[in-house]
Image (cartoon, grey):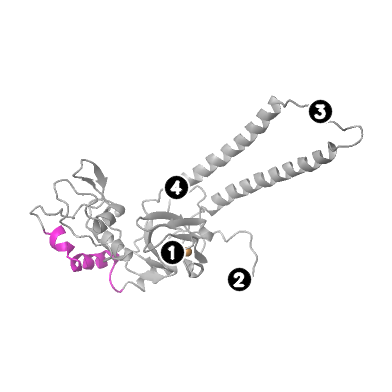
Amino acid sequence: MGKFQVFPDAAATNASAYDYLYYFESIVTVVMVVLIFTCVTVFAFKYRRRPGNENTPLIHGSTKLEITWSIIPFLVMLVMFFWGAKIYFDNGKPPANAIDIFVVGKQWMWKVQYPGGQREINELHVPVDRPVKLTLASEDVIHSFFLPAFRLKRDVVPGRYNTEWFIANKPGRYHIFCAEYCGTEHSGMIGWVTVMKQDEYENWLAGGGSSGTMAEQGEKLFSQLGCVSCHLTESAGRCPNLKGVYGTKQQLADGSAVMADDAYIRESILNPNAKIVYGYKPDIMPTFQGQVSEENLLQLIAYLKSIGGKRPAVAPGAPAAPAKAKLVKTASAGSMQ
Ligand code: CUA
């Protein structure tokens, strides 16, 4: 507060990667601005109309000059393109050992839940030096989850899951903003991310989640909503048994195939007729649109994941291997856990 900063704090491993590209682009911009304005000023003076210099000579242009000032900026732009693409792809895929955290944007707050069942609003707690994967959903309109200190900003769009990941590398507290105008209280849709040492994080996790893990909460919902009567016990062919389904390929009635991932399960709950599994009929399952919140959907998915095929559910707070430096080139020397 009160301290003037040109750049926000840098508290994630990829922050410097973004910053270097940003410096490069800023320098190129400044150099070009100075060059162009200098030429305009100097030439305006040098070639001004004055006695003995009344007539403009007829100039036919210079191919050599034109090629030069086309090729050089083109090459500079290509550097920006490939540099940017590299950072983009480096950051595209979360490491398999990332901790899952789920964020739901809602007018006008950020609701955060952890696999262990802990929940909070406008606060996000993460351990230092561990990859964290955020799954972002919106309950209403488009928001944008913005963590300047992590150089992370991602739109939170109703009807779909967006993911982002990061490795925080500096304990502390950093701002969360909403960066997409979303109504009256948009400017108040702010919060804090707290980066904690591993043992502090374990302690913090142990303090919450009295209502069970996300998967347990999902299991409760699964029976409350009546899913269990059909989707776990039924074998008469009315609906598919969901045991072992998550993370596997599903053959659909229309001949195509789909991966049973978070997005697919979410869609099947809200719009059961969108993708009918091969061998089953449409219009049997009712829609749950409007009956389950985005948070509930994430809990149901966590439950199906826990009884799914591949990718067994990771126990809450289970220590994962430290992130490989290979995944993030700029990773600082990770502290031992
Ligand atoms: Cu949410 Cu702006």
Q: Is residue 69 above or below residue 267?
A: above
The numbered mark, 4 or 3, whose residue comes first in the sequence reads 3
Q: CA distance from mark 3 to mark 1?
A: 69 Å
- The image's mark for residue 57 is 3
Q: Nearer the viewer, mark 3 or mark 1?
A: 3
- The image's mark for residue 265 is none
Q: Are marks 2 and 4 in contact (CB under 8 Å)?
A: no
Q: Nearer the viewer, mark 3 or mark 2?
A: 3
Q: CA distance from mark 3 to mark 2?
A: 60 Å
Q: Residue at 43% of width from left, 53% of height from top?
A: 323
**Residue interval drawn in magenta:** 210-233
Q: CA distance from mark 4 to mark 3?
A: 60 Å
320 or 256, nearer to the observer: 256
Q: Are marks 1 and 2 in contact (CB under 8 Å)?
A: no
Q: Nearer the viewer, mark 4 or mark 3?
A: 3
Q: Nearer the viewer, mark 2 or mark 4?
A: 2
- The image's mark for residue 327 is 4
Q: Residue at 17% of width from left, 45% of height from top?
A: 278
The numbered mark, 3 or 1, whose residue comes first in the sequence reads 3
Residue extending farthest left: 236
Q: In this figure, which residue is indicated by the disc labeled 2? A: 1
Q: Secondary structure at mark 4?
A: loop
Residue 131 in sight from this viewpoint: no
Q: In this figure, which residue is indicated by the disc labeled 1? A: 126
The numbered mark, 1 or 4, whose residue comes first in the sequence reads 1
Q: Are marks 3 and 1 in contact (CB under 8 Å)?
A: no
